[in-house]
Image (cartoon, rainbow, N blue to C red):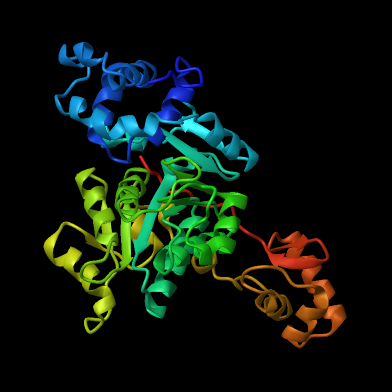
């Protein structure tokens, strides 16, 4: 066949090309890349597809006998392959290609061995370095209000403690986990089964665009790739490997979230499961994990963090609970602080109405609270001060 139209000696181009040529989780491709590297492996494949590369693989350089047979499924994707098109599409979206050796490459993915991705296609404001302090929250698409409430609260608690949330961007528990992190302005990562140019599912487009603004959306397949069932299943291994622990919030007996938990357990990542009502089929998968595996029962962010590191002062109750929101305040200041929203900010007239105090009393109290570090200005509004997050040790 004809030579490829791009520079096959460029390591980044070669890695990107392999993410198009081989399906996610292809262990034959992983073995070939481990032995030869993306550049030499791509050159070998081009010659093998033309019928001239069998001597090299026969000599054992490819690392496993199945590689020769794999040429039959890889070679068709060489036809018309110009990976620069996908890279141009990624650049137009403000994205970037991340390969092994880059500073933000998530080292946890290397634990996948021959099933590790060769490249990651990334969009978003955050570096993937935040995965070093991340927990996966996963669960069923057909979630209940109970499951979504638990996912939101857990993600908020993790975000407030400086821990990122990883999930799959799907409906149900995934979406609730991302929303919880965003509610406390914490970065979150969504790992997709298709290309990052098509935010999927389309019903979560607005949510995933919010994820992009402060976190990241990631795929191991290039732009233009469709989310197929097999890719969803393989995507789960990245969620597990890219996190320090995996928590199944709500899952039915055969939920796909259980595969993520299985990947995490195989990688020696701690696994947690949230219990639900014993009458709820939506929690049957979580109960199955608790009965049949080493999964740990967890119910909130503090218990989730016990999975990944020692507890102590870093995992004390949330600041307001530990100190007491109104401790040490006179009655007027206490009413003003209590009238401010728990999240977000409010202008002084709103605080006047909520507290039932006069404008003068509210202005005076806000000034005293500001001097005490209990409130802060946010433009023309006021908000409760946010203590510096107490980061748990994830070592």
- To which quarter of the image does residue 91 belong? top right
Q: Residue furthest right?
A: 360
Asked whether the viewer can see residue 317, the reply is no
Nearest the eye: 176 or 349: 176
Describe residue 175's horizontal placement relative to residue 40 as left or right. right
Front residue (pair 195, 135): 195
Q: Where is residue 90? Give x, y as percent.
A: 57, 39
The residue at the point 38 percent across, 60 percent down is 302
- Please tell me whether residue 2 is drawn above or below residue 129 in the rendered image: above
Q: 242 above or below 228?
A: above
Asked whether residue 166 is in view, the answer is yes
On-image quarter of the N terminus: top left
The residue that appears at 63% across and 70% down in the rendered structure is: 328
Residue at 50 percent across and 50 percent down: it is 162
Q: Position of residue 199 (x, y in %)?
A: 52, 55
Q: Is residue 389 left or right of residue 67?
A: right
Placement of 8 over or under 257, stated as above or below? above
Quarter of the view holding residue 346 = bottom right
Q: Nearer the viewer, residue 223 or 370?
A: 223
| Quarter the C terminus occupies | top left
Q: Residue furthest bottom?
A: 356
> Hey, which quadrant is residue 327 in on the image?
bottom right
Question: Where in the figure is residue 379, as x and y percent of width and height?
Answer: 81, 61
Above or below residue 149? Residue 41 is: above
- Where is residue 2 shown, x and y percent of the image? 42, 19
Residue under the image location 36 percent in, 49 percent down: 239
């Amino acid at each position: 066949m004809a030579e490829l139209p791009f520079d096959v000696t460029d390591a980044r181009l070669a890695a990107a090309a392999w993410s198009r040529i081989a399906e996610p989780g292809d262990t034959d491709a992983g073995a070939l890349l481990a032995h030869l590297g993306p550049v030499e492996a791509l050159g070998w494949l081009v010659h093998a597809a033309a019928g001239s590369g069998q001597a090299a693989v026969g000599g054992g350089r490819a690392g496993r006998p199945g590689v020769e047979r794999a040429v039959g499924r890889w070679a068709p994707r060489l036809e018309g392959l110009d990976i620069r098109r996908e890279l141009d599409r990624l650049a137009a979206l403000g994205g970037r290609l991340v390969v092994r050796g880059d500073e933000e490459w998530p080292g946890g993915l290397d634990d996948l061995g021959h099933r590790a991705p060769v490249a990651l296609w990334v969009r978003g404001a955050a570096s993937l370095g935040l995965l070093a302090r991340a927990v996966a929250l996963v669960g069923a698409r057909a979630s209940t209000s109970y499951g979504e409430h638990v996912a939101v609260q857990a993600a908020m608690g993790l975000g407030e403690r400086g821990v990122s949330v990883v999930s799959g961007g799907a409906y149900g528990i995934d979406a609730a986990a991302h929303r919880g992190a965003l509610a406390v302005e914490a970065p979150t990562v969504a790992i997709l089964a298709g290309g990052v140019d098509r935010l999927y599912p389309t019903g979560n487009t607005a949510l995933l665009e919010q994820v992009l603004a402060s976190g990241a959306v990631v795929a191991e397949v290039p732009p233009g790739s469709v989310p197929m069932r097999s890719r969803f299943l393989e995507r789960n291994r990245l969620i597990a490997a890219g996190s320090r622990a995996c928590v199944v919030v709500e899952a039915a007996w055969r939920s796909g979230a259980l595969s993520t938990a299985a990947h995490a357990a195989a990688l020696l990542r701690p696994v947690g499961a949230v219990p639900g009502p014993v009458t709820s089929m939506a929690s049957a998968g979580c109960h199955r994990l608790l009965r049949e595996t080493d999964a740990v029962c967890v119910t909130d962010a503090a218990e989730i963090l016990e999975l990944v590191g020692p507890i102590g002062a870093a995992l004390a109750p949330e600041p307001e609970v530990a100190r007491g929101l109104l401790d040490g305040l006179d009655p007027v200041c206490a009413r003003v602080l209590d009238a401010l929203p728990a999240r977000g900010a409010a202008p002084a007239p709103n605080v006047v109405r909520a507290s039932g105090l006069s404008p003068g009393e509210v202005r005076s109290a806000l000034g005293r609270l500001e001097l005490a570090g209990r409130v802060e200005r946010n433009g023309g509004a006021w908000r409760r001060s946010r203590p510096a997050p107490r980061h748990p040790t994830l070592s």
